[in-house]
Image (cartoon, coloured by chain):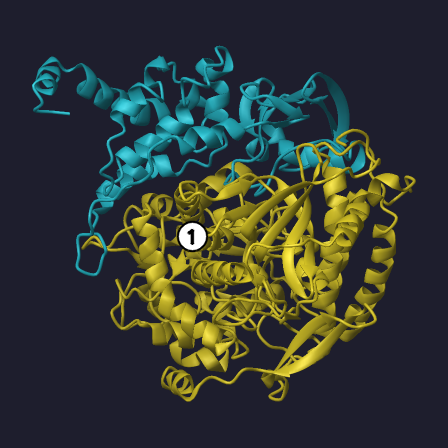
C-alpha cells in the first residue's frame, strides 16, 4: 500500500515543533483520516478537534501546507504527496496543544453583537409572513459553520492581533445575517463602526478565498455593511439632521 | 495538578448551578433556555465547542403539524403516524404531547431568528418524509439542523446561561437517592471539576460510536445512558437502534456519513445494479393503503399531488434499510457494496432539474462533489445503511422527563419513549424542542423546591477522580491502546448486534463484551492530562461498554422482529411481545438486569384517534 508523510505541529502553549509521521494512504482519504490513523497507531495523545467529518460542523480547522482549510474536506489526492504534507494549528489564535487552539475569543466577540430583534408578528396567531426571496438573501450568511478559517486568514487578526478592536469576518457575516434578516429591526450600524471595528477591513478578500461554505464574505456581507455604516455616519445631510435632532 | 499523567487529583474546582444541563445539542440548549427563563441559574456542560453537537448534522427538517402545505394535517394525524412508525411500543402520552406541542416549538424558533423555507403565501414550507402522511417537515434546504442549533445557540448566549465548553462528565453525584451534581474534567488542562446542582438534565445524544459504520461523531458514546444507569436510573427499549437506510458507502473514509431522506422526499429513487426499483417488491401490510402502486403516482406525490400516495422509498427507515440490506446480500448491490440512490433521473420530469436539485439539496450536492467526486445532478449516489439513532434510552416520565432517579432529567436522543421501535425522520428535531423545554421547565421547578443546600459526598468525588486517573497509572500493554479497544468493540457490535441479529451471534457478543471489559480495565495511555484524546477515548470506553451490553441483552430478550430490531431466527412479529418493553437497570449485585414491563396503553381518546387513522 502507498504511504505518505505528514509533518504535524506538536506542542503546547509555550513551544512546539513539526514532527514527521508516515502512514498508509488509501482511496478517497482526507487529511483528517491520516491524522486519525497516526493518532490510533503512533501518537495516541495527538490533540485534534473534529466532529462531523462531513464539512458541516466546522471543528477541524487547520493550516494544511500553509492554507487554512478543514481537514475533513481536504482530499489527499488533491495534495502533492511526493513531499510531506504540513499540518499546523490556526495561527490567529493562541495554541493550546498540537492542532488545537484557543478559539474562545470568538464566542465572546459574538456575544457582544446585538441579538436578533424581530418586528411585531404579522398575523394574529403570532406568526410572520416572509417572501422566499427575502429569506434567501440572509440564507447565504446563515450557511456559516463557524470554522473560524476566515478569522484565521484575516491579517487584522493574524498579523496585527487587533482582536480587541475588530470582530473579524465571521462576525461581520453574523451581523450581516441579522441586518438582512427580513424580520430584524435592530440597528447595529454605530456598533459596527465603533465597537466592532468594521473600518479595519480593507477588503483584501482573503476570508472569501478560504471559506469552505463558499460564502462571498467580502462582497456580499462586509461591503454592504460598510455602505450602511458610512451612509449613517458620514452622509453630510444626515449629519445636519442629526445635529438639529431630526435623525438619529 | 495539571502536570504529568498520574499524580494526585488535587482539589477539583467546584461550580454551582441550580440546573446543570449535560449536552449542548438541540435538547440541551432548549432545556437550558427553558430553565433560565424560569429564573434559576443554569450551566451547560458540553464535550465539544458550542454549536458543534450532532444536531448540526440534521438535514431533512423538523416535523410539526403546522398544516401550512396540506390543511388535512393535525396533531392527531402526526400522533397516529408516530405511533404506527413506532409499532405501538411508544409511550402514547409522549407521542401526544410531542404532536400537540411541536408546532409552537417551531414557531418559537422563528421568533428567535430561525429562517425556514417559505410557502408562496409567506408561511413556513413543509416537505414530505418517510412515514408522515402529509408534508410536515419545516426545513431550510438540507441544513435544518444547522439553522436550529445556531438559532438556539445565538438566543441562548443572551439568556444568562453559563457554558462550560469542552468538558466531559464521567460520573453523577447522588445524595440520599437524589442527584446533586456531577463530576468531570475539562479537556484543555485536564483539571477535574465538581458541579453542584439542584437538578441535572441529561441531553447527551446517542450511541452511534459503538458501531463501526455510523453517521455519529466521536462524541456519541452513550454517556448519558451510562451516567444514568450508573446513578441507578432505568433504561428502556435499548434493542431499538435505528440504522438509517442511506449513508455514504464510498470512498471508505466517508462510509456512514448521512445522506438525507430529503433526497427521497424530493423524488429520489432506490435502484439495484439491474436498475430495478426494488422498493416496490415488498410493502408491509400496515402501509399498503398508503403506498403508491405505480412509479408515476409516487412521483406525483413528491410533487405535491394530494390525490397521490407516497412512493415506497418513503416507507419507514427500518423497512427501507432492510430492503437495501436484502439487495446487497443477494448480490444485486452497487460496486462498493451499497445500492443506487438516484435523484438525477428527475430531469426526465422537470426542466432545470440540476438547478432544482442544487437548490433543494445543496448540502448533499456539496458533500458528494467534494468527498466522492460524484455530481448528484448527473449520476446516482451509492448508499447503504448506517448506524444513526438510538430509540431507546433513559426511562422518563412523559410529562416531566424525570428519570426514575429524583432530580435527574433526560431529553432528546438519550431519553426514550417517544419513538417506540422505530423513529420517523423529522421527529427527532421536534423531540429535542418539545421535551428539551419540558425537561428544563421541570428541572428548574425541582431545583427550586430543593433549596440551595447541596452537599456533595466526598467519597463519590474521590472515587470518580481515582477512576479517571487510572489509565495513566497502568503499565502500557500491547494491543490495549484505547483506540484499539474502541475499534474492536465497534467491529464486534457491527458484526454481531447489527441490522440483522441472531441469538447465536449475540451470545458471542456477550462473551466478547466480557473480554472487552477486561481489556478496557487494562487500557493505558501515554502523555499528560492536557487535551489528551487517548485519555478521553479510554474514559469513554466505560459508557460504550454499558450501552453495548444493554443493547445486546435487550436484543437477545426480544425473540421477534419489530421496528428497527430484526431477528433472522425470529423474522415474524409476536403479538405477546408487542405488548412488552424491556427495562435495563443495575441489580443489587452490581450486574446488569433486564425486566419486562407492559407497554403503556393509550387512553380511550388516543386509541380512537389511532383507529381513525389506520
Label total for image: 1
Please name whichever residue, A69 or A44, is drawn nearer the observer in this view of the structure: A44
State the quadrant of the C terminus of chain A.
top left
The chain drawn in cyan is: A
- The residue at 29%/19% (across/down) is A193
Q: Is A89 left or right of B113, judged from the image as shown?
A: right
User: The residue marked by circle 1 belongs to what chain?
Assistant: B
Quarter where residue B323 is shown? bottom right
From this view, report whether residue A153 is shown above or below residue B265. Answer: above
Q: Secondary structure at mark 1?
A: loop
Q: Is B148 left or right of B89, judged from the image as shown?
A: left
Q: Is B369 left or right of B524, judged from the image as shown?
A: left
- The residue at 47%/71% (across/down) is B399
Quarter where residue A19 is shown? top right
From this view, report whether residue B397 is shown above or below residue A84. Answer: below
Pointer 1: what residue?
Answer: B39
Q: Residue furthest top?
A: A160
- Residue B218 lies, in percent from the top left, at 64, 46
- Is residue A157 among what the camera can see? yes
Q: Dot 1 surroundings within 10 Å: few (below 14), some, or many (20 or more)? A: few
From this view, report whether residue B464 is shown above or below residue A225. Answer: below
- The residue at 45%/28% (across/down) is A211
Please name whichever residue, B152 or A85, is drawn nearer the observer in this view of the structure: B152
The chain drawn in yellow is: B
- Residue B140 lies, in percent from the top left, at 36, 49
Please name whichever residue, B252 or A213, is drawn nearer the observer in this view of the structure: A213
- Residue B327 lies, in percent from the top left, at 60, 65
Amino acid at each position: 500500500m502507498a504511504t505518505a508523510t505528514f509533518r504535524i505541529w506538536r506542542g503546547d502553549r509555550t513551544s512546539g515543533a513539526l514532527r514527521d509521521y508516515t502512514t498508509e494512504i488509501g482511496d478517497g482519504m482526507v487529511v483528517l483520516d491520516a491524522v486519525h490513523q497516526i493518532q490510533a497507531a503512533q501518537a495516541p495523545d495527538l490533540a485534534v478537534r473534529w466532529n462531523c467529518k462531513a464539512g458541516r460542523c466546522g471543528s477541524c480547522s487547520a493550516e494544511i501546507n500553509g492554507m487554512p482549510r478543514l481537514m475533513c474536506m481536504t482530499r489527499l489526492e488533491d495534495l502533492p504527496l511526493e513531499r510531506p504534507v504540513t499540518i499546523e494549528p490556526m495561527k490567529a489564535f493562541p495554541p493550546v496543544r498540537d492542532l488545537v487552539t484557543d478559539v474562545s475569543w470568538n464566542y465572546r466577540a459574538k456575544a457582544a453583537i446585538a441579538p436578533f430583534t424581530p418586528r411585531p408578528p404579522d398575523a394574529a396567531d403570532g406568526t410572520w409572513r416572509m417572501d422566499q426571496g427575502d429569506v434567501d438573501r440572509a440564507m447565504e450568511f446563515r450557511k456559516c459553520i463557524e470554522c473560524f478559517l476566515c478569522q484565521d486568514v484575516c491579517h487584522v487578526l493574524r498579523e496585527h492581533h487587533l482582536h480587541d478592536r475588530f470582530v473579524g469576518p465571521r462576525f461581520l457575516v453574523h451581523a450581516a445575517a441579522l441586518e438582512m434578516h427580513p424580520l430584524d429591526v435592530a440597528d447595529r450600524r454605530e456598533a459596527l463602526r465603533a465597537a466592532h471595528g468594521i473600518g479595519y477591513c480593507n477588503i483584501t478578500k482573503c476570508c472569501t478565498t478560504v471559506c469552505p461554505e463558499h460564502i462571498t464574505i467580502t462582497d456580499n456581507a462586509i461591503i454592504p455593511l460598510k455602505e450602511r455604516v458610512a451612509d449613517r455616519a458620514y452622509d453630510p445631510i444626515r449629519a445636519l439632521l442629526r445635529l438639529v435632532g431630526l435623525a438619529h | 495538578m495539571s502536570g504529568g499523567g498520574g499524580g494526585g487529583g488535587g482539589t477539583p474546582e467546584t461550580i454551582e448551578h441550580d440546573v446543570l444541563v449535560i449536552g449542548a445539542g438541540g435538547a440541551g440548549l432548549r432545556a437550558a433556555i427553558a430553565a433560565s427563563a424560569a429564573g434559576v441559574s443554569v450551566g451547560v456542560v458540553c464535550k465539544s465547542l458550542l454549536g458543534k453537537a450532532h444536531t448540526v448534522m440534521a438535514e431533512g427538517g423538523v416535523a410539526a403539524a403546522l398544516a401550512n402545505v396540506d390543511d388535512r394535517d393535525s396533531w392527531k394525524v402526526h400522533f397516529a403516524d408516530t405511533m404506527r412508525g413506532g409499532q405501538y411500543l411508544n409511550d402514547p402520552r409522549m407521542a401526544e404531547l410531542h404532536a400537540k406541542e411541536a408546532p409552537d416549538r417551531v414557531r418559537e424558533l422563528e421568533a428567535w431568528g430561525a429562517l425556514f423555507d417559505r410557502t408562496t403565501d409567506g408561511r413556513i414550507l413543509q416537505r414530505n418524509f418517510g412515514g408522515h402522511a402529509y408534508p410536515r417537515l419545516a426545513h431550510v434546504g438540507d441544513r435544518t439542523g444547522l439553522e436550529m442549533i445556531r438559532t438556539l445557540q445565538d438566543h441562548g448566549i443572551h439568556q444568562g446561561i453559563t457554558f462550560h465548553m469542552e468538558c466531559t462528565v464521567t460520573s453523577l453525584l447522588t445524595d440520599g437517592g437524589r442527584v446533586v451534581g456531577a463530576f468531570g474534567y475539562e479537556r484543555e488542562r485536564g483539571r477535574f471539576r465538581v458541579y453542584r446542582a439542584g437538578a441535572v438534565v441529561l441531553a447527551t445524544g446517542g450511541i452511534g460510536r459503538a458501531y463501526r459504520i455510523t453517521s455519529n461523531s466521536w462524541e456519541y458514546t452513550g454517556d448519558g445512558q451510562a451516567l444514568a444507569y450508573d446513578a441507578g436510573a432505568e433504561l428502556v427499549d435499548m434493542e431499538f437502534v435505528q440504522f438509517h437506510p442511506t449513508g455514504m458507502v464510498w470512498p471508505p473514509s466517508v462510509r456512514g456519513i448521512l445522506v438525507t431522506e430529503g433526497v427521497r422526499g424530493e423524488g429520489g429513487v432506490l435502484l439495484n445494479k439491474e436498475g430495478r426499483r426494488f422498493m416496490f417488491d415488498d410493502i408491509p401490510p400496515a402501509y399498503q393503503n398508503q403506498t403508491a402502486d405505480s412509479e408515476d403516482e409516487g412521483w406525483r406525490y413528491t410533487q405535491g399531488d394530494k390525490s397521490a400516495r407516497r412512493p415506497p422509498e418513503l416507507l419507514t427507515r427500518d423497512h427501507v434499510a432492510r430492503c437495501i440490506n436484502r439487495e446487497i446480500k443477494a448480490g444485486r448491490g452497487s460496486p462498493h457494496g451499497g445500492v443506487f440512490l438516484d435523484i438525477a433521473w428527475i430531469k426526465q420530469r422537470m426542466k432545470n432539474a440540476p438547478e432544482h436539485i442544487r437548490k433543494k439539496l445543496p448540502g448533499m450536492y456539496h458533500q458528494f462533489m467534494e468527498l466522492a467526486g460524484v455530481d448528484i445532478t448527473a449520476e446516482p449516489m451509492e448508499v447503504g445503511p448506517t448506524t444513526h439513532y438510538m430509540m431507546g434510552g433513559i426511562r422518563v416520565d412523559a410529562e416531566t422527563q424525570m428519570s426514575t432517579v429524583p432530580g435527574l432529567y433526560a431529553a432528546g436522543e438519550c431519553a426514550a419513549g417517544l419513538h417506540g421501535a422505530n423513529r420517523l425522520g423529522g421527529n427527532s428535531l421536534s423531540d429535542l424542542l418539545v421535551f428539551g423545554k419540558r425537561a428544563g421547565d421541570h428541572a428548574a421547578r425541582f431545583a427550586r423546591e430543593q433549596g440551595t443546600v447541596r452537599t456533595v459526598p466526598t467519597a463519590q468525588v474521590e472515587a470518580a477522580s481515582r477512576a479517571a486517573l487510572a489509565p495513566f497509572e497502568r503499565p502500557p500493554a500491547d494491543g490495549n491502546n484505547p483506540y484499539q479497544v474502541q475499534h474492536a468493540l465497534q467491529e464486534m457490535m457491527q458484526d454481531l448486534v447489527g441490522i440483522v441479529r441472531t441469538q447465536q451471534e449475540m451470545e458471542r457478543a456477550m462473551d466478547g463484551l466480557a473480554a472487552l471489559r477486561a481489556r478496557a480495565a487494562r487500557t493505558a495511555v501515554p502523555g499528560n492530562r492536557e487535551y489528551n484524546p487517548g485519555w478521553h477515548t479510554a474514559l469513554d470506553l466505560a459508557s460504550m461498554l454499558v450501552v453495548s451490553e444493554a443493547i445486546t441483552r435487550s436484543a437477545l430478550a426480544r425473540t421477534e422482529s419489530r421496528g428497527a430490531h430484526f431477528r433472522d431466527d425470529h423474522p415474524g412479529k409476536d403479538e405477546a411481545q408487542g405488548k412488552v418493553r424491556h427495562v435495563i437497570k443495575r441489580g443489587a449485585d452490581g450486574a446488569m438486569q433486564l425486566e419486562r414491563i407492559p407497554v403503556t396503553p393509550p387512553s380511550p381518546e388516543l386509541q380512537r384517534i389511532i383507529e381513525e387513522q389506520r
